[in-house]
Amino acid sequence: MTAWEKEYGEALYELCKEENCAQEVLEQLDMVRALFQAEPKYPKILQDPALQKAERLAMLDEAFRGSVHPYLLNFLKLLCERSAVEALPGCADQFRTMYNEERGLLPVTATSAVALTEGQKQALMEKLSKLTGKTILLENRVDPSLMGGIKVNYDGKELDGSVAGRLEALRRILTDGKA
């Protein structure tokens, strides 16, 4: 994420926080981001210098007026005016980071060889909540190459309790003589 994306994401978040619409705008940011990913030509058109700025802004109005909060629509227009629509994902990431931090939420990705049961998810969330002091937002991904165990990623940290990870550590010990 660039400093520019961080700054703009923070500004949008602070505005929405003051106006008590942060959750609504966050959900809509996710929707717009998904639409842009599903139709990658659309953001490119919004930055096409061959089109008049007024035409590009009108396209945003036509697509989103009435379906997203006016602050988000104006934010999209600002990105469009600056030919920076590709910065939306980074701005949205910063918005989400600030939203989660303020509410004590911690996104966690748990990767396992098979899907975790509800009981396993609950136990993991409780353990991580005690460890971090935050409310855990758990996403479980399945990767059969792990063979067993679990990898947990949060806040830039990785806890690798997978069979594949343990075998790799053992291989390093045997080949390098160090853990």
Image (cartoon, rainbow, N blue to C red):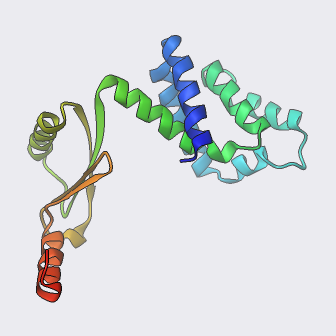
Counting the numbered discs, the total is 0
The answer to whether residue 97 is left or right of residue 130 is: right
Residue at (51, 12) in percent of width and height: 18
Q: Quadrant of residue 115?
A: bottom left
Q: Residue furthest bottom?
A: 175
Residue 166 sits above or below residue 127 on the image? below
Residue at (55, 38) in percent of width and height: 6
- Where does the image place residue 176, in percent across and percent down from the top left? 17, 85
Residue 119 sits above or below residue 13 on the image? below
Q: Nearer the viewer, residue 85 or 67?
A: 85
Q: Residue furthest top?
A: 19
Residue at (33, 23) in percent of width and height: 103
Query: Quadrant where the C terminus lies?
Result: bottom left
The answer to whether residue 115 is left or right of residue 61 is: left
Residue 33 at least partly seen: no
- Where does the image place residue 131, in percent across and percent down from the top left? 13, 38
Q: Nearer the viewer, residue 99 or 68?
A: 99
Residue 138 at least partly seen: yes
- Where does the image place residue 109, in percent across and percent down from the top left? 28, 49
Residue at (70, 47) in percent of width and height: 43
